[in-house]
């Protein structure tokens, strides 16, 4: 596995104004993530997991400190540059799947490729490959309403990995799934991580996910409380 | 790419899209229909007036003022040579007009007595009926005049006028024909008789009040003592009248457009509030805000395109049918002052249809764009949580 540095945060602070008060979501977070990691941000609600994921994903900007993703400082990126970074290098998986209801599974996955300037033939090949990775090639024409929760999340995974990004950020990906489906999609992500050397970072407090992690970063009140390498994930 | 996405999104919205499309297509068709009526009214009135009264323009004797009846008695002069040459070539027809009275059924009715050559074919007036030599003084009137006076074909009516010296004279005349015409100005308050008869009655041989040129006449010569009134000048009143009628129609289609645009605006506002998570997802996938604004604007604008197609589907057969069968007008329309007859035939030019389509599409696009400006302020993280910034 390649050991190059993918993400670097230094003294990262995120403060949200709450009326006259200020809420510190992240408090001087210093973390490095390397290519191919399968790591997770764990902690109770409000500990800053999603905020950190959003900043790393260039969806949000820090209040102080710096975040470098693939050598680019997030706080210096324009809106357009941030969009380009996400488009080319970052895949997202959300708790509520966020599939567009009027599109088929195929079209939802294809959405991630539309801005990359690929021709339709190339797109089709990549989309079908991604759907095969998640075992849903036969449901390509189904709309989200015709898919189960587990299937919908697998389509979302296919959408996140179809462009073979360096980084996939997954925010509570199993929160709406039962145990069986959770393990299925986690196994899929582990396989993708191994095959494509894609870095996965989860924000989760789901024990099922935590058992698959090879690095567990515990956040409490916006601070890194523990950063552990797990040599032998228990998985199931 | 955005077009495909926008089309997919609005078709996926189902009934909401189709309700908007129906309302907008109704506005489309109604605007074109009403504009076609106005154009048809204009065209029909102009054609009828050109054919029956004003031809390709008129020479007016210098004293003649159709809006001042008191000048009519003296508004006549010998037809000058250049105009007579046109008359001789069949390119013009002289008309002598004098004020007078008729006495139908014991009542007095002021009229303008008009003398015209019975052999003329330049104007669409059945003057040949005045050539009947068996009748002492044949006269021709229109249906409106007949209705107002109660006169019928074969009736005798006393006609009174003043001759060139101002002396009153009177004769009995016989109604030989009642013409049906859409042009009120040659009907109401007018009686027509042979030009030579009127010249003889008034003692002004060889004179005329006005001379109507054949339509298509160009570069008429300048003639001393006579003013040339162009087609443009003679049509200005009727065009102003049509214009005033079109204002009423414009109000109708502005209301329709407002309703349609309100529906589009409402849908766009609703979309932007309901589809924030979708916007957040698109942002996460690398769409810029500008691209999302374009997508949502395109969706709104596509309502206009779908409405144009839907409007074409039922509008083209409907409007084509109206063009062929015309629109029967109620009797009261006659009092509008238009020469449009019993049926109005709308006229739909390519320019009208394309112009209206482009106008509606532009307005729809603008209305679709306005609410999407909120997206420019939307933060991806807020959007993903389904909130507005």
Image: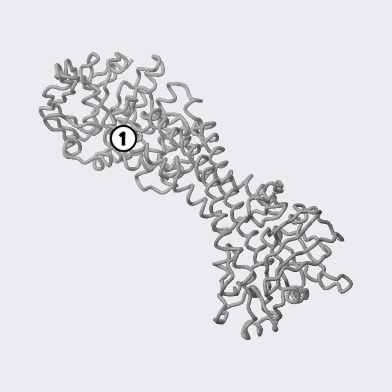
Question: Which is nearer the eye, B2 or B290?
Answer: B290
Question: Which is nearer the eye, A234 or A118?
Answer: A118
Question: Which is nearer the eye, B58 or A14?
Answer: B58
Residue B121 can be seen, yes or no: no
Which residue is at 54% across, 67% downward? B233
Q: Is residue B231 left or right of residue B271?
A: right
- Tell me where residue B112 appears, x and y as whole percent: 69, 64
Q: Is residue B155 left or right of residue B230?
A: right
The answer to whether B156 is drawn above or below residue A191 in the figure is below
Question: Which is nearer the eye, B147 or B317?
Answer: B147
Dot 1 surroundings within 10 Å: few (below 14), some, or many (20 or more)? few
Q: Find disc 1 in the rendering and name its residue.
A: A196
Query: Secondary structure beneath disc 1?
Result: helix
Q: Is residue A130 left or right of residue B121?
A: left
Residue situated furthest right in the rendering: B134
Which residue is at 47% across, 34% downward? A103
- Tell me where residue A192 appears, x and y as whole percent: 33, 31
- Tell me where residue B289 appears, x and y as whole percent: 31, 39
Count the marks: 1
Q: Is residue A119 left or right of residue B90?
A: left
The answer to whether A121 is drawn above or below residue B111 in the figure is above
Which residue is at 33% across, 36% downward? B285
Residue B147 can be seen, yes or no: yes
- Tell me where residue A235 appears, x and y as whole percent: 31, 17
Quadrant location, the C terminus of chain B: top left
């Amino acid at each position: 596995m390649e050991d190059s540095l993918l993400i670097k945060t230094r003294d990262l602070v995120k403060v949200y104004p709450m009326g006259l008060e200020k809420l510190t979501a992240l408090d001087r977070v210093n973390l490095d993530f390397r290519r191919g990691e399968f790591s997770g941000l764990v902690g109770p609600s409000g500990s800053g997991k999603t905020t950190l994921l959003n900043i790393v994903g260039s969806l949000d900007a820090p209040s102080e400190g710096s975040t470098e993703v693939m050598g680019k400082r997030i706080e210096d990126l324009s809106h357009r540059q941030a969009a380009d970074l996400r488009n080319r290098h970052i895949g997202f998986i959300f708790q509520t799947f966020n599939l567009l209801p009027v599109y088929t599974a195929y079209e939802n996955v294809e959405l991630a490729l539309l801005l990359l300037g690929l021709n339709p033939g190339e797109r089709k090949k990549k989309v079908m490959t991604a759907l095969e990775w998640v075992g849903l090639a036969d449901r390509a024409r189904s709309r989200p309403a015709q898919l189960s929760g587990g299937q919908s999340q697998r389509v979302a995974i296919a959408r996140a990995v179809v462009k073979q990004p360096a980084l996939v950020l997954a925010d509570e990906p199993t929160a709406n799934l039962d145990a069986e489906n959770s393990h299925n999609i986690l196994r899929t992500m582990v396989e993708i991580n191994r095959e494509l050397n894609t870095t996965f970072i989860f924000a989760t407090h789901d024990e099922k996910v935590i058992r698959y992690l090879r690095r567990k970063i515990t956040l409490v009140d916006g601070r890194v409380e523990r950063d552990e390498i797990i040599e032998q994930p228990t998985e199931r | 790419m955005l077009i495909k996405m926008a089309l997919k999104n609005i078709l996926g919205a189902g009934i909401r899209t189709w309700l908007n499309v129906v309302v907008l297509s109704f506005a489309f068709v109604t605007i074109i229909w009403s504009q076609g009526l106005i154009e048809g009214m204009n065209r029909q009135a102009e054609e009828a007036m050109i054919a029956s009264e004003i031809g390709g323009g008129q020479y007016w004797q210098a004293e003649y003022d159709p809006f001042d009846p008191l000048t009519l008695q003296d508004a006549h002069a010998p037809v000058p040579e250049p105009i007579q040459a046109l008359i001789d070539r069949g390119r013009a027809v002289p008309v002598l007009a004098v004020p007078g009275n008729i006495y139908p059924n014991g009542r007095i009715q002021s009229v303008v007595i008009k003398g015209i050559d019975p052999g003329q074919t330049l104007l669409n007036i059945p003057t040949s009926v005045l050539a009947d030599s068996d009748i002492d003084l044949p006269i021709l009137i229109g249906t409106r005049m007949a209705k107002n006076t109660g006169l019928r074909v074969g009736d005798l009516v006393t006609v009174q006028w003043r001759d060139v010296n101002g002396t009153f004279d009177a004769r009995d005349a016989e109604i030989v024909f009642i013409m049906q015409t859409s042009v009120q100005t040659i009907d109401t308050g007018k009686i027509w008789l042979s030009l030579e008869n009127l010249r003889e009655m008034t003692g002004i041989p060889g004179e005329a009040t006005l001379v109507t040129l054949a339509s298509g006449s160009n570069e008429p010569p300048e003639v001393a003592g006579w003013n040339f009134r162009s087609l443009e000048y003679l049509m200005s009143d009727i065009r102003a009248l049509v214009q005033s009628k079109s204002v009423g129609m414009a109000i109708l289609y502005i209301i329709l457009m407002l309703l349609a645009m309100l529906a589009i605006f409402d849908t766009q506002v609703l979309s932007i509030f309901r589809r924030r998570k979708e916007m957040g997802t698109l942002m996460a996938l690398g769409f810029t805000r500008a691209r999302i604004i374009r997508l949502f604007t395109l969706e709104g604008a596509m309502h206009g395109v779908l409405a144009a197609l839907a409007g074409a589907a039922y509008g083209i057969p409907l409007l084509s049918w109206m063009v062929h069968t015309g629109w029967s007008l109620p009797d009261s329309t006659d009092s509008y002052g238009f020469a449009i007859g019993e049926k109005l035939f709308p006229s739909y030019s390519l320019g009208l249809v394309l112009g209206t389509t482009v106008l509606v599409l532009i307005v729809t696009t603008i209305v679709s764009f306005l609410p999407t400006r909120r997206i420019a302020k939307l933060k991806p993280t807020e959007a993903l949580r389904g909130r507005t910034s």
